[in-house]
């Protein structure tokens, strides 16, 4: 399960693949990226990791093991279940061997454009220069970052490698749990609250993401509403210590 946002994004990447292929990393970078953004996807209803979360976490851990990334930002609120996606993926990455103090959390994003924009604010606050994305369709995510003036490369998940690695550490990943949010409310309710607070209404993803190409052509740039006043700079080591 990758969520409606992820499905739309994956479809668009397939449709415009020739335009995004230049953003794909097909081997080792010349030097490690300062930070790799790992966008979220939903946990299972009982709080266990979904296959999507496991795949993204394992792939991010692979980049760490290869010394291709120095830091990570996991992004995603409790969007479809009462479990914060950024926390779930961070916990899975730590279980796979990534140091918890190298994983920063972006726990507010409700959609892919917010994953990218909010994470970019954290990267800039921490003075990270080189940025990459690790996900199912990272080249599409990179296009969004380019809109906001950030050079980006994509590490699209190697599904066959992830499948083998998943078999090796499935037991450890099965045990991963993060706290349930007692204040969880539906996505629709939160979108209504953001619109009330900001005076801006976000179009549905399937419309917005189709519009982005036209906006680029016209020199326009989409800016997600509802961003926190100050980008968080909290690591998984700091967060998990409070659980």
Image (cartoon, rainbow, N blue to C red):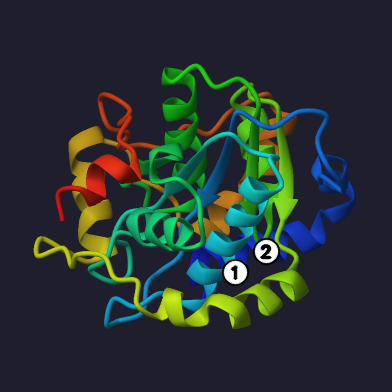
Which residue is at the front of the view, 152 or 129? Answer: 129
Residue occupying image coordinates x 59% and y 53%? 60
Which residue is at the front of the view, 122 or 16? Answer: 122
Q: Is residue 92 left or right of residue 84?
A: right
Residue occupying image coordinates x 15% and y 49%? 242
Q: Which mark is residue 10?
A: 2
Q: Which mark is residue 239?
A: none
Q: Is residue 202 left or right of residue 242?
A: right
Question: Which residue is most to the left?
Answer: 182
Q: Is residue 199 left or right of residue 26?
A: left
Can residue 20 be spotted in the picture? Answer: yes
- Residue that carries the numbered disc 1 in the rendered image: 7
Which quadrant, please, contains the C terminus? bottom left
Spatial separation of the CA atoms under disc 2 and disc 1: 5 Å
Which residue is at the front of the view, 132 or 197? Answer: 132
In this picture, is 14 found above or below 119?
below
Q: Is residue 154 left or right of residue 97?
A: right
Contact between labelled residues 1 and 2, with CB atoms less than 8 Å apart: yes
Q: Residues within 10 Å of mark 1 (few under 14, many from 20)?
A: some
């Amino acid at each position: 399960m990758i969520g409606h946002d992820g499905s739309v994004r994956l479809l668009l990447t397939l449709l415009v693949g020739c335009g995004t292929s230049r953003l794909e990393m097909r081997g080792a970078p010349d030097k490690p990226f300062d930070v790799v953004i790992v966008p979220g996807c939903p946990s299972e209803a009982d709080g266990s990791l979904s296959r999507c979360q496991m795949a993204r976490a394992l792939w991010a851990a692979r980049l760490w093991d290869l010394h291709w990334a120095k830091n990570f930002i996991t992004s995603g609120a409790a969007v479809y279940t009462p479990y914060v996606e950024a926390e779930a993926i961070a916990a899975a990455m730590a279980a796979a061997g990534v140091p918890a103090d190298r994983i920063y959390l972006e726990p507010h994003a409700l959609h892919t454009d917010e994953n990218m924009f909010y994470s970019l604010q954290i990267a800039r606050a921490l003075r990270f220069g080189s940025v990459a994305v690790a996900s199912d369709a990272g080249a599409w995510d990179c296009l969004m970052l380019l809109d906001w003036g950030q050079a980006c490369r994509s590490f699209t998940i190697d599904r066959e490698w992830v499948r083998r690695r998943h078999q090796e550490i499935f037991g450890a990943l099965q045990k991963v749990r993060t706290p349930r949010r007692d204040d969880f409310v539906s996505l629709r309710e939160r979108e209504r609250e953001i619109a009330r607070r900001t005076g801006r209404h976000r179009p549905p993803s399937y419309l917005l993401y189709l519009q982005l190409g036209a906006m680029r052509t016209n020199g326009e740039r989409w800016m997600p509403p509802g961003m926190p006043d100050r980008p968080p700079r909290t690591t998984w080591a700091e967060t998990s210590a409070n659980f």
